[in-house]
Structures are given as C-alpha cells and as structure tokens.
Image (cartoon, coloured by chain):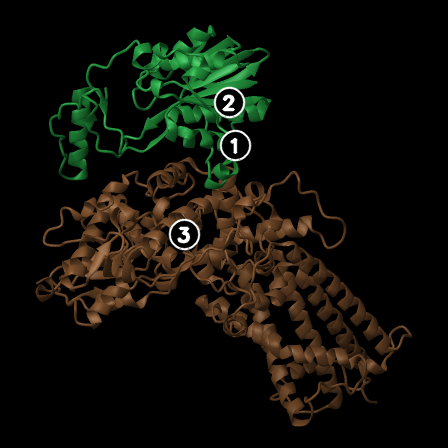
Amino acid sequence: MTLLEPADVPIAGIPAYIVALIILTLALCFFAFVMYRRIDLLRRGMPDPRFSDIGERIKLALVYGFGQYRQPRYLGAGVLHILLFAGFMILSLRSLTLIGLGFSPDFHLPLLTGSAAFAYEVLKDYVVLMVLAVCIICIVRRAVFTPARYDHPGGKGHGSEAYVILGLVSALMITDMVFDGSALKQNGAQGHALFFPAASIGALFMPEKGSQALNYLHIGGYWAHILVFFGLLNFLPISKHFHVITAIPNVFFSNLNKGAIKPVECGVDDWMELPECGVGHFERFTWKHILDFYSCADCGRCSDNCPATTVGRTLSPKMISIKARDFAYEHYPIFGAEKDRSKIQFTGDVVTGDEIWACTTCGACEAECPILIEYIDKIVDMRRYLIDQGDVPQSLQKPMQQIKKKGNAYGGSKAKRAAWTKDLEGVEVRELKKGEAADLLFFVDSCGSFDPRIQEISKSFARILTASGSDFGILGADETDSGNEIRRLGEEGLFEQVCQKNIAAFLERDFKEIVTFDPHAFNTIRNDYPEKFPIVHASQLMARLVRNGRLSFTGDYVQGKVVTYHDPCYLGRHNGIYEDPRFVLGRIPGIRLREMERSRSRSFCCSGGGLLLWYENEQERERMGEVRVKMASEVGAEIVVTACPFCLINLEDAIKTTGNEGKMEVVDLVELVDRSLGTHARE
Amino acid sequence: MDIIVCVKWVPDTSEADLAIAGGAKDIKKDDLDHDINDWDRFAVEEAVQIKEKVGGKVTVVSVAPEDAEEMLRESLARGADEAFHLWDDAFEGSDGYAVATILAKFIKDRPFDLILTGTLADDDCSGQVGGMLAAMLGVPNAVLVSSIEFLDRKVKFKKELEGGLYEAVEMDLPAQLSVATGLNEPRFVSIRAVRKVASAEIPVIDCGELGLDESQVGPQGSKIQVEEVAMPPEGEGAEIIGGGAEEAAGRLAEILKEKGGIG
C-alpha cells in the first residue's frame, strides 16, 4: 500500500482541490478585507510624502528590514528574532508548495525541481527544527524570565498575543513534521536523519508503516498545517503581530530627514489657516504615523532606552504606539460602524499632556526601534495641538514669552547679547555689522550670550578661535534664539519668526561657514531652517584645526585623569557626530578615556536643552542628569566631557545633588580644549 | 455675564539695568520692553474662563500708548470679545486717579456685571485704580480676589488676608474685583492665536471722544505728584557661606535664628 497524498483524498465526499480552493478563497478574502479596512484608515490620515529617494529607501529596507540590522542591539532577543525571520523567509517557499499540494500531488514551484528541490528540502527541514526550537525558547523566555521591557506602564498590553503567535508557529512546524514524517515512515527510507532531521524526528512518533493511522496522520497533518497557516495569516492584521506584514514597508517609508521636524501639514504652505493645528484628533496623524502604530510589536526597546521612562515620568514611547493602535482598532473596527469619537479627544484623553510634555526629544527611542518607528514628530504634532489650545505647562510659558519679546528665554535685552565679550583679555570678538565679512560666523545662541555659566564656554571658544588664527565674528544684537526647542515644543509660529530673523541676519553678512558649540542651534540651523547655510559644530571645527596643525595641546589640565565623554543627543543621535569630539580628546596628552556603557547612539539624555531647562516635571523620581552622573561614576570618571552647554548645566547640577562634588567635574569640550591649549598656539 | 477687564501696559524691568531719567521723576523707559501687567493677565484669563463657563461677553480696555495694541490683541487671542484702546497725548503723566477717571468715563454708559483688574501693577505697585474706579462707578470693590463663583445676581469669592488666611465674601452685582495672581493658570497665547485676531478692529478713543476735558487727565487731572525717583543705596555686601555642607548649614541656621527667620 502506498501513502495517499492530500490532493487524492476527498474530504467528506468533496474533492480535495475543491476544499483547498474554498479554504484558499475564504482565507484570502478575509485577509484582503481586513487589509482593506486597515489601509482605508491609512488613507484617511494626513498626507506625508514618502516616495522620494527610492534608492535610499530600498537600501533601508534591505539593511533594516531584511538585514535586521538593529536587532542585535539586544543580543539575545535579536539573535532569536533574526533566526525566526530567516526561518519565515526560507519557509515561505515551503508554505506556497504546501498550498499547491492541495490541488495536485505533483505540485512544485517553478525552478524548484531536481537537485534544487532536494537542496531546498534539506534546508527546509533544518529550518523547521530551528524555528520550533526558537519558538520554545521564546515561550520559556517570556513566561519564566520575562524581561522588564515587556511591562505596560500606564496601560494594558497584548502580551498574551505573543503566546498565540508562538503557539501557531510551533503548530505549523509540528504539522509539517507530521506530514513529512509520515511520508518518511511509509517510504521506509533509513539513514535520512542527516538530510531530513525534522521529518526523521516526526517519523519516530508515527504508527506502523502501511497502517491506516499513518495515512490519516499524513492527510490530517497536511490539512492542519493549511488551516494553521491561514489562521496565522489572518491573525496578523488584528494583533500586535501586524509587524510581520508592515515592518518592511514601515522601514521603506521611514523618515529620511534626520534631525528635522516635519511641517505642520505636508503640502500646506499657509498652515496658520488650518482649522486644526497639529494632532488633536486621531485622523490628524499622517498615514505613515498610523502605519507606525500598526507596526509596533510592543517589544519595548524604545521605552527601555527612554530617559523619561527611566526616571519615572509618565511617558513611555511604546505605550503611545499601543494606545494609539488600540484606539484605532476600537474606533475603526473591521466589522461594523465606526465608533463615536466626539466624547474622546485623542490628544489629552488617550495620550495625556503629562506624557506629551515629558519628552526631551532626545531620540533614544527612534535610535533603538528595529523597524524605525518615529516618535518625535508625533510628540511635536500633539504639542502643536496643545499649544494651539493654549494648554502649555506654566513653567514653559514664561521662557516662550521671553523669546517672543526679546529673542531669548533668559529675558536679557537684545542690546546686551554681546556683553560677554567685554571682559575677555587679549581676545577681540568682532560684532559683524551688516555687509561685513569673516571666515567664520560664530553663532553664540541665547545660552552662550546670557547664561553666566555658558558665557564661559563662549569665552573659551573665542580664545580657541583666536589662538588658531581664525577669522571670526558674531552677530551680536542681530542674533536671535536659534529656535530648536521652540519648534520641538510645537510653537511653529514663533519658530518661523526666530528662524526668519536669523536667516535675514545671515544673508546680510558674508561668511564661509557658521560655527556653534551648541548642538541644538547646530541641529536646527542645519536641519530645520528652510534656507541652507554651511554650518559646523565646534567639535568638528576643532578636529579640523587639530588636523591642520593649528591647535596643539598640553596635558597640564587633564593630568592623567580618567575622562569620559557624554554624547549630546543633538550632536550624536540627531546628527551622527560621534568621532570628532573623541578625536580631539584623543589628542590631549595623558588623557585616559573610558567609555560609559551607554555611549554614542545609546547615550542617555541628561534632561534636555534650550527651554527644557525651565521645564519642571512633577512625576519624576530622580533627575536624568543624576542617572547619567551615576553612569559616569561607574566607569570611575573624574572628568565628564560633553559638547553641549545644556548637558553641562544639567550634569553640573547633578554632580552636586548626587554628592559627587570634588570627586567629579564636568567640562565642555570647548573649555577642556581652551584649558589644554599648547603655549605656542596661545602665542 | 458682561465683564470688563482693565489692563495696564508696563515696562519689563526684571533683567534690565535701570537708570533714572525725566528729571529724577521716572526711570528711563525707552530701551525697556513693555508687556501686559502680569496681574492683569490673570484678570483677562479669569474673565475668559468665566465666559466659557457661564456665557457672556468680555471687553478689555486699557489707557496706554500706541505700542500697547499688541497687549490688547493678545487679550483678544486669549478669548476676549472686544478691546478698546484709550489714548490721547494728554493722558501722558496720568496718576491712578486720572486713569480711573478715564476708565470710569469709558465704562459708565456700558452695560456690565463685573469689572476685573489686577490688584497691583508691576511698575508702580500703587494698587489705586481698581478701588477708585469702583467708587467713581458706585459699585462695591474687593482686592486680592480668587475663586470667583456666581449665584443668582451675586458673586462669591475668596479674598487673601494676612498670614495665609482667606475670607469668603459674597457681593451684589455689578461689582469691581481686583484679582490676585495665581487664581488661575493663564493659557498660552500662540503666534497663530494672535494671527487669527489680526484683523479684529481695536478702536482707539481719545480724550474728546470720551467727553473728557484735558484738565481732567494727565498731570492736571492727577492728585499725586512724584517728587523723586531714586535708586536704593547700595547695601552691605552679602555673606558668602563657605565650608562643608554641615558647617554651612550650621552657619545658615545661626543667621536665620539671629535675624528671626526661624524660631
């Protein structure tokens, strides 16, 4: 007796191919309908042009999608995911073949014949075992060693769905093993264990060769596999595992304008005339942002790296995605009418003001997300709405008013913007009048002009520029706050005003490039300003001056102390400048550089710059700066070097409040360079 | 509920280097930025919140020079329904009494249930206009008011007393209340909100249109004459407390005890 194949055996008197056809049709129709409903909601989102630079997008899809580039940032989970993803890719051919086998016992995919088919069969059999093993490890890992990042602070999650999926995937593997194992048993082929390990293991559990039971298992295994397969396919778009389908498109359509904030509404010039500014209602999110919500797999890597979550603020980036997706699925159901949304305001009720204002826009979440989900633009869009409603924390209102009135948050008069230059000895700082020229335009920004502590960095930088023989000048009274935080706090109208003032001041002067030591100003001028100007950060300029032999250092100040470098968010994550500051540090004789565990793209924000210096959060247990100082003391740092004036302020405070005064000091890279200038350079 | 809010345009002296000018009768104001008196910002916000709760109309009015239109427009953006700008060169140099005269003349023939002002102004801290305006209009007045509520034709509110005490007061309408700061959380007024009211007309009304004689306003109509404005004499140097945390805390406690800061 030979084994009957699925296509040969009618089910309840109905020919198998008809059964296969019915299952296929029903499953695909249901899937298509669900997908149509999901895509329909995307179409109702706001426009967002994501079809430019197709080459770059394909690269992203290959690197971050198929290449799973970010997965190993969490090594254990990352490797498991890569194995599972590879398994899915490889077994997709197998699944297609199995569907075909319902129609004809001789079905095979084109090209997959002969030795290619044999090679694939062997590969497939190993992969089946691998995927099953990974599923079991994942189930145990989840159930027994639940990582903290799977928590759902301030909401409920979908952790149980993970077990459903892992269970279904395991069932797919097991039914495949039953299907192939029964065939192997029947054909009695021995010594195949090396080639077909999964089928061989399956065969171990099979009844006797030639038995009716074996045939039942062969046929039953097949149909069970088919049902599980289509069940899984249809479960994806209604669960957090939609990412299996949406992740690669999500990566393909991800944001290419790093460091910049999206316009209020894409394609609309006069946004001031819009009925609603920013995102108050769910449909005001762009279609891509809704796709982000679909795509989140609740892995929690964003929140695990979020400084706001770490210190106990109510913000958890992952919960924004989960709450938004729950809101979408509830109010735009697959079956039935849309739910009434008049009694619930997305921004305010679903995502609260406390969450929205708690974000420092440091970008740690975005740097971590394996599928490039965006958070900052969404936060800013929701802030734009709150700003428009006048709903802004009191602590932020005063500094914003000051910028509106005086062009800086400190309340200093415009006329005194260059006052810091007056008590510099032996250094002349030129205030460039309209029409005047200099090689470098030193953009001091409000902090460097008015904050007494940060004025020290301005002075140091002026000394460095002078020592290196650079021709430079400042805007003086014609300079206005760069507006980086104004824009990120959602006050777009005020941002437009300050940026236009600065652009006008730039255009009225003649310079080769702008230089600033404030990464926030650097970021917004480089990425947000509609008019582009060549701009470098002080660390880049100093690295260049060192390379050109125009700066040299002594070890007199550092004296062999242990130094650690804190990557500022707006220099590192948002602009990819990690090496220049380290290069400059490395040139200081006797320096002992030690990296903190969280450095470069994983750097830990010390609570934000610009206007966020004024922001008071009531929920946090400790200051972000304090957490960072502890990380620095873990590596025994005696000097913490940063390259951002706001980091300096936050960390200096934190050193005091953590009782590290006298044990540790924080300096700006500019100050350290100034204090380490070689004598010949000073002359 | 028809509410009229009187607001003042004051120089921002917080971060400025002050200089004496005008023959030692005033400070030099040319370089100073001006803004709405902070107390009055709370008054406008309170009026708008009342309107949002019980309905009605909010009118904002100020006796202030031309630049002050910005403040009136911001008040419209905050939610006021109309704004009036009372100005005439003859108003220059008006004291609290003269300003109250001008405001009373403007308000007299208008319907109102409530007049709100700030209790004090950030610049001269005289706290005169509210009370005098109430007297001129013949309505009751209270200062340092918070927690305003309405009951039929009465207004109920709290009034700050010394030592952190509150007095609960009930008053017949119409009435004039001078509000305390912090009685609400003023909303943020964005550039877009101001843009939305950019075309709203803010009538400027001069002395003649108000039906006032020039002798009733400005220095002539004032009851107070400033003799001299002077900088405070430089005080003794502050003591910088040195030493470790314990030592410094000990010294600080000592000083506070000595000066009566703590018992």
Is residue A611 found left or right of B259 in the rendered image?
right
Q: Nearer the viewer, residue B241 or B9?
A: B9
Above or below, comparing residue A395 to residue B100 in the picture: below
The residues bearing labels 3 and 2 have C-alpha atoms spaced at a distance of: 46 Å
Q: Secondary structure at mark 1?
A: loop
Residue at the spot 13% in from the left edge and 25% down from the top edge: B235
**Palette colour of chain B:** green
Is residue A429 found left or right of A364 in the rendered image?
left
**Palette colour of chain A:** brown
The percent coordinates of residue A235 (x first, y second) are: 69, 62
- The tag on residue B200 is 1
Tag 3 near tag 1, CB within 8 Å: no
The residue carrying mark 2 is B59
The residues bearing labels 3 and 1 have C-alpha atoms spaced at a distance of: 45 Å
The percent coordinates of residue A382 (x first, y second) are: 52, 47
Q: Within the image, what quadrant is residue B40 found in? A: top left
Above or below, comparing residue A608 to residue B82 in the picture: below
Mark 2 nearby-residue class (10 Å; few <14, some 14–19, many ≥20): many
Tag 1 near tag 2, CB within 8 Å: no
- Same chain for mark 3 and mark 1? The answer is no
- Same chain for mark 3 and mark 2? The answer is no
The residue carrying mark 3 is A307
Q: Which of pointers 3 and 1 indicates the residue nearer the eye?
A: 1
The chain letter for the residue carrying disc 3 is A
Is residue B5 found left or right of A406 in the rendered image?
right
Q: Earlier in the sequence, mark 1 or mark 2?
A: 2
Q: Amino acid at mark 1?
A: Ala
The chain letter for the residue carrying disc 1 is B
Residue at the spot 48% in from the left edge and 71% down from the top edge: A69
The chain letter for the residue carrying disc 2 is B
